[in-house]
Image (cartoon, rainbow, N blue to C red):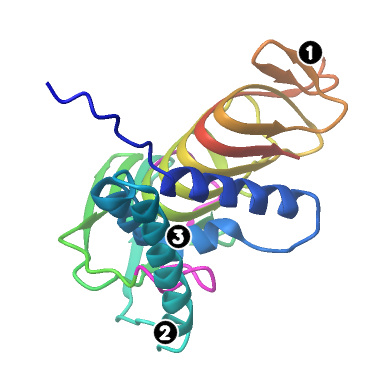
Amino acid sequence: MNNRHRRPGITGPVILISLGVIFLLNNMGFIELNLWDVIMRFWPILLIAIGLDILIGRRSAWGAAIAVVVVLALLAGGIVFFDNQAQWTYAAEKFEIPLGNVEEATISIDPALGYLLVDALPKGSNELLRGEVRPFSGEEIGKTVDISGTRATIDLRTEGVIVAPFFGGWSDQPSWDLALHPEVATDLIVDFGVGKVELDLQDLQIGEIHVEQGLGQMILLLPSADNMDINLDGGIGEIQVVIPEDVGVRIRAGVGIGNVLVPSDYTRDGDFYISPGYAAAENQIEMVIDLAIGSVQVR
């Protein structure tokens, strides 16, 4: 029987420590860096790092050192090379769905990756949904629209095999840019892979919001409304929620590794964070947030 002790990997701990230091310096204001943009640009290097760690990093101290050097060289080379490359651009696919007699809608959005922005159309618009998607190479956009009487069900999703510019950025402009009718009662369901989600719902009539995201940044601006059903579920990333001043909120927030930041006048009851005056507020919202690794910020 071979009882030879196998060395623990060093590449993974080095990456985690480095990310932790960057998070700390960023939160303390010593640096200004969008860490999630960096992660979204270079996350394939994390996969390379794990592979190298398994292949050679756990065999010896020299193997671990070589794995770390190779990963750092790839990261530096990627920054230098890809920052000088032109952005990948593809013809935008436009969506214009007429309002008709629709008064209620369930809208599902399922992008694989990129930057999703959702906000409101102007009041009085004759469209239920308007927007455009700039697909990555190999990405096809599927659309299903079912309108029955005054209710609509819309499903927009990524299809096909994507060959994405992983080292490029998508923080400058949305690759999915959608606007919804402000006077239609809407349930919004988002299932997102990798990237940035920004949901500006301040001028919309929202009943249910359910967002699942694998990796990246999620920003949610809520309207002044009552009895919304809000569930946010993330893997690795950052979740920011902006609460209107006239809304009382009760949040159940759980983070596996990371932190939850709420205003100083919120009270805590176990996993729940409660805004001042919640019980007497005319508009009350209950929210569930689950994040495996990262940070949740409520303001």
- Which quadrant, please, contains the N terminus? top left
Distance Cα–Cα, label 1 vs label 3: 40 Å
Q: Residue at x 42, y 49 (%)?
A: 11
User: Looking at the image, which is closer to me, 2 or 80?
Assistant: 2
Asked if residue 266 lies left or right of residue 184, the reply is: right
- Amino acid found under the numbered disc labelled 1: Ala
The part of the chain drawn in magenta is 166-190
- 3 or 2: mark nearer the eye: 2
Q: Residue at x 76, y 32 (%)?
A: 262
Label 2, secondary structure: give it.
Answer: helix
- Residue 191, position in %: x, y? 36, 43
Q: Residue at x 24, y 29 (%)?
A: 4
| Residue furthest left in the image | 1
Residue 167 part of the magenta-drawn span:
yes
Label 3, secondary structure: give it.
Answer: helix
The residue carrying mark 3 is 40
Distance Cα–Cα, label 3 vs label 2: 16 Å
Q: Residues within 10 Å of mark 2 (few under 14, many from 20)?
A: few
Q: Earlier in the sequence, mark 1 or mark 3?
A: 3
* Position of 192 relative to 90 (above/below): above
Distance Cα–Cα, label 1 vs label 2: 55 Å
- 1 or 3: mark nearer the eye: 3
The residue carrying mark 1 is 279
Q: Earlier in the sequence, mark 3 or mark 2?
A: 3
- Amino acid found under the numbered disc labelled 2: Phe
The residue carrying mark 2 is 81
